[in-house]
Image (cartoon, rainbow, N blue to C red):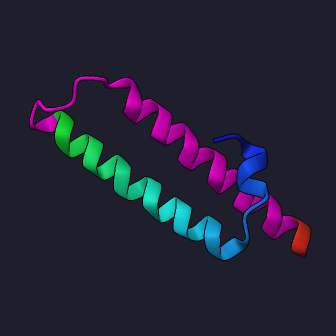
Amino acid sequence: MKASEYAAMSPEELNNKIADLKAELFNLRFRLATGQLENTMQIKDVKKNIARALTVKTQARKVAR
């Protein structure tokens, strides 16, 4: 997802999306450890999406002050 898509979300939706992404990252790491993950780039993509979402969340918090 793009940062603009995260910015369009409400704070509650953004928190839920971050939680979903973290759960997906956990599952990908688990699959990597057990040798079931074929495309390791998925881990990098999910990490970047988490970082984007957290950045948008931080920016929204700073604007709200």
User: Is 53 on the left-hand or right-hand side of 43?
Assistant: right
User: Is 30 on the left-hand or right-hand side of 47?
Assistant: left
User: Is 62 on the left-hand or right-hand side of 42?
Assistant: right
Placement of 34 over or under 25, stated as above or below: above
Most extreme residue toward the left is 34
Residue at left offset 63%, top offset 55%: 54
Give how far across and how far down residue 36 sits, in percent.
14, 32
Residue at left offset 73%, top offset 61%: 58
Give how far across and how far down residue 13 sits, in percent.
63, 70
Placement of 22 over or under 15, stated as above or below: above
Q: Is residue 42 magenta?
A: yes
* Quadrant the N terminus occupies: top right
Placement of 45 over or under 14, stated as above or below: above
Give how far across and how far down residue 8 sits, in percent.
79, 59
Magenta residue span: 33-62
User: Is 23 on the left-hand or right-hand side of 48?
Assistant: left
* SS majority, magenta: helix
* Quadrant the C terminus occupies: bottom right
